[in-house]
Image (tube, rainbow, N blue to C red):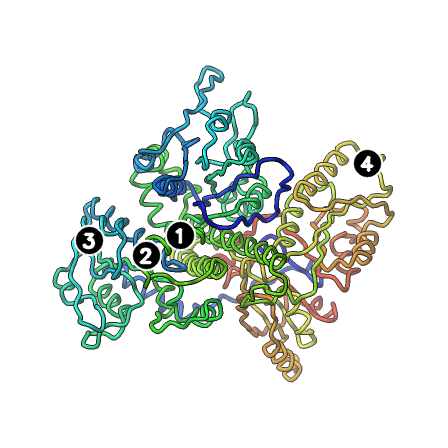
């Protein structure tokens, strides 16, 4: 695809000599929906139109249909790595760079490289190629997207650790949803075209449960719609700059006419803070709101904080900053009062808090931080983020 | 907000009472019976949805027909689009076609011939077509219903532009009106729906290079992008309905997380406007749906303020949400807490949003 304007959400600085390559992501809701197949088919079509496409990485043990789809595409040989007596195949980033194609097809964005590789993650390899000005098409499953991590956990009960940072997907020019009905996917699995026969049973009872697949599919479709929406907003902003006075009218202008939302995330040492940060960041993302993360302690540095707690707080602050959330530390004796005062001074409209288990004495007094913030912050919306999977009480189950 | 519960007033630590068992919804029961009936005769309707001409619906559908045929299913093609790319023609050559009928006014699928032939699967492309005058049915989607009734599975394709409920929205985006539409309920009743999603620039490219001039929609990329988002959300909505019925049929625990559901709990003293506005800022998440509950205690006379709150709620539009699906229920119970527990079981609502001008209103529950 050589046409189309560049619509990255956050424009990369173009100070370097080469312009950054475009990224196109094929998003699926589970293994076997046909992401790779579609990517290869589009690659074939592009090659037929005369575009210089190469297949840079491709799972060697793929389905026969998919392998057939690689016929005629130029393949960059994989890098063979020996590790602990076994042989592994990895993307040969340097070889792709030497070949300098217009478009490189790289399967499985969420892959972790074998120890000893130049970069630990495949998405870093991909970033490397993009920075060198090569357009990359890649595939990812929904559960490997950082921003939906918590939802995936809610739906499946599985905590996915291998995730690709939001920023990588956000900078993609295109996210394409690859959809297939759960019925068709289950048939593919039963026919043994996705997993080996001995694994089929386990897959069907676990991740590929009918209800899981339907919920994941819905989530993937909504995510894809959101990605389309984000790119529209960026596109509209860009065209508003280039065409002063002639912005394209949109059917639902509701969101723009509302006052700007500002979200404050209250960071603590509690492990549930990671969920909180993700949630707050996601809310800000949807509302196009500003987002601040705040940690309050008696003194503005955390010198008297136990080392364990300090580590966790620092980790949370780092995580917030990695999501481009402004993270601050403020000193204050009364935590609740300091948080609310700070929010008020900064015109915050929503506070995100988590349920922190209070210290023994506070619990006796009925002193819960979350409740106290709700009580004090009259003019703000307070969201208490759940930290457990939702379970129905036994007597309410159908 | 599946992970979050927005709480205006706290409940304290009172114990939740077990609510009375919920009566099954008659509509749902009917739907279930219908679903079971259609399953008995084994005929299934699968729809391929696209946001504009050129996304590749027909290709995806015919390719599936080809794969099914090669796996041994008895597949015929009952109706095809007038204009065909070379790829589609290659696929069609491998499949048995039943010639369509009709004259100058247009082409119609030969329903009688298909019924006589009685295949397992029939391809009808596209779905939104007005049949020529002398046909058995006025609309093609009625043809499809007839085939399904006779135990023939149908594969069909729909362009978002031709869904009745989206007519107005699509007209606002494209400035064009469509003559023949199909009802959205038809999509919701389909056994399977699949969206054919491609980037807008590829769609434009195909319109410019592979379609004949009649197939070109003359839409700009920005408009296509709006349509694309609508199509994705429509599919998500259908999938959500399927998830709900799946959960119901299989009697399993509801799955949370994919669809945000809010519960807004109001009392006679609630400020409906503020609460509506507040929930609107949350509702933009993934097109959540809202259940607005009007909680009242049975032993109190509060009819008048209550109707005032409800009418304020219904009258005032909130600009932000793209699809505002709020339903109002007014259960009566002596305990607000028990009321809160109700929708969790009946609708799979996860979070609970409470509101009231005075915190005491909610707290004096059980």
State the separation of the CA atoms marked 1 and 3. 31 Å
Q: Quadrant of residue B158?
A: bottom left
Q: Are marks 1 and 4 in contact (CB under 8 Å)?
A: no
Q: Secondary structure at mark 3?
A: strand
Q: Position of residue A359 (x, y in %)?
A: 78, 44
Residue at mark 1: B205
**Residue labelled with disc 3:** B75
For label 4, the SS is loop
**Category of crowding for the residue at label 2, using alpha-carbon neighbours closer than 10 angstroms: few (below 14), some (14–19), many (at least 20):** some
Q: Nearer the viewer, mark 1 or mark 3?
A: 1
Q: From the image, which quarter does the N terminus of chain A lie in?
A: top left
Do the residues at discs 3 and 2 belong to one chain? yes
Task: Check disc 1: other Cα within 10 Å, few if <14, some if 14-19, many if 20+.
Answer: some
Binning the other alpha carbons within 10 Å of mark 4 as few (below 14), some (14 to 19) or many (20 upward) gives some
Q: CA distance from mark 2 to mark 4?
A: 68 Å
Find disc 4 in the rendering and name its residue: A305
Q: Earlier in the sequence, mark 1 or mark 3?
A: 3
The residues tagged by marks 3 and 4 sit, at their Cα atoms, a distance apart of 71 Å
Tell which tag, 3 or 4, sits nearer the viewer.
3
CB atoms of marks 2 and 1 within 8 Å: no
Judged from this view, the residue extending furthest toward the bottom is B304
Determine the chain carrying the residue at label 2.
B
Q: Mark 2 sits on what residue?
A: B211
Q: Nearer the viewer, residue B341 or B350?
A: B350
- Asked if one can make out residue A358 in the rendered structure from this viewpoint, the answer is yes
Q: Is residue B193 above or below residue A245?
A: above
Chain holding disc 3: B
């Amino acid at each position: 695809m050589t046409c189309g304007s560049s619509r990255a959400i956050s424009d990369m600085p173009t100070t370097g000599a080469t312009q950054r390559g475009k990224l196109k992501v094929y998003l699926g809701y589970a293994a076997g929906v046909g992401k790779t197949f579609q990517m290869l088919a589009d690659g074939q079509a592009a090659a037929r139109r005369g575009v210089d496409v190469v297949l840079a990485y491709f799972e060697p043990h793929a389905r026969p249909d998919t392998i057939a789809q690689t016929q005629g595409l130029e393949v960059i040989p994989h890098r063979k790595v020996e590790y602990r007596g076994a042989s592994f195949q990895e993307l040969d980033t340097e070889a792709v760079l030497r070949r300098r194609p217009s478009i490189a097809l790289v399967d499985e964005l969420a892959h972790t490289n074998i120890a000893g590789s130049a970069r630990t993650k495949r998405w870093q390899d991909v970033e490397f190629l993009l920075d060198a000005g090569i357009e990359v098409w890649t595939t990812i499953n929904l559960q490997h997207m950082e921003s939906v991590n918590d939802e995936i956990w809610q739906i499946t009960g599985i905590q996915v650790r291998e995730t690709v940072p939001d920023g990588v997907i956000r900078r993609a020019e295109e996210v394409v949803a690859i959809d297939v009905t759960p019925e068709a996917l289950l048939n593919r699995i039963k026919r043994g075209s996705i997993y080996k026969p001995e694994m089929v049973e386990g897959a069907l009872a676990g991740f590929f449960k009918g209800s899981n697949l339907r919920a994941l599919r819905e989530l993937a479709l909504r995510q894809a719609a959101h990605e389309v929406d984000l790119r529209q907003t960026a596109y509209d902003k860009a065209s508003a700059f280039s065409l002063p006075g002639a912005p394209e009218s949109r059917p639902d202008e509701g969101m723009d006419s509302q006052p700007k939302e500002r979200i404050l995330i209250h960071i603590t040492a509690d492990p549930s803070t990671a969920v909180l940060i993700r949630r707050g960041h996601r809310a800000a993302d949807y509302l196009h709101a500003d987002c601040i993360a705040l940690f309050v302690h008696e003194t503005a540095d955390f010198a008297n904080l136990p080392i364990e707690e300090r580590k966790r707080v620092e980790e949370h602050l780092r995580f917030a900053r990695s999501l481009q959330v402004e993270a601050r530390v403020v000193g204050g004796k009364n935590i609740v009062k300091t948080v609310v005062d700070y929010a008020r001074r900064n015109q915050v409209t929503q506070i995100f808090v988590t349920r922190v288990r209070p210290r023994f004495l506070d619990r006796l007094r009925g002193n819960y931080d979350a409740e106290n913030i709700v009580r004090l912050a009259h003019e703000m919306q307070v969201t208490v983020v759940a930290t457990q999977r939702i379970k129905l009480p036994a007597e309410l189950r159908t | 907000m599946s992970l979050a519960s927005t709480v205006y007033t706290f409940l304290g630590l009172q114990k939740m009472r077990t609510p009375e068992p919920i009566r099954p919804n008659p509509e749902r029961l009917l739907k279930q019976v219908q679903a079971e009936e259609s399953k008995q005769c084994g005929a299934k309707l699968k729809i391929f949805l696209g946001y504009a001409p050129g996304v590749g619906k027909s290709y995806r559908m015919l390719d599936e027909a080809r794969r099914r045929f090669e796996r041994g299913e008895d597949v015929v093609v009952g109706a095809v689009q007038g204009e065909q790319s070379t790829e589609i023609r290659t696929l069609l050559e491998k499949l048995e076609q039943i010639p369509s009928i009709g004259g100058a006014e247009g082409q119609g699928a030969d329903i009688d011939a298909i019924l006589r032939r009685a295949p397992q699967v029939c391809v009808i492309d596209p779905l939104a077509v007005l049949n020529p005058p002398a046909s058995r049915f006025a609309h093609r989607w009625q043809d499809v219903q007839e085939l399904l009734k006779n135990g023939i599975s149908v594969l069909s394709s729909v362009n978002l532009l031709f869904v009745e409920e989206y007519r107005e929205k699509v007209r606002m985006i494209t400035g064009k009106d469509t003559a023949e539409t199909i009802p959205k309920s038809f999509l919701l009743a389909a056994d399977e729906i699949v969206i054919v999603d491609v980037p807008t620039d590829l769609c434009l490219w195909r319109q410019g290079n592979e379609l004949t001039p009649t197939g070109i929609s003359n839409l700009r990329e920005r408009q296509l992008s709006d349509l694309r988002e609508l199509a994705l959300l429509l599919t998500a909505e259908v999938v959500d309905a399927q998830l709900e019925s799946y959960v119901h049929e299989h009697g399993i625990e509801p799955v949370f997380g994919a669809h945000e559901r809010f519960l807004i709990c109001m009392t006679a003293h609630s400020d409906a406007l503020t609460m509506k506005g507040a929930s609107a800022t949350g509702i933009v998440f993934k097109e959540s749906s809202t259940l607005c509950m009007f909680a009242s205690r049975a032993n109190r006379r509060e009819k008048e303020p209550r109707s005032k709150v409800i009418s304020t709620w219904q009258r005032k539009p909130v600009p932000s949400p793209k699809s505002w699906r709020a339903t109002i229920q007014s259960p009566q119970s002596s305990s607000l807490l028990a009321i809160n527990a109700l929708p969790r079981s009946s609708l799979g609502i996860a979070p609970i949003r409470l509101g009231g001008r005075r915190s005491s209103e909610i707290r004096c529950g059980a």
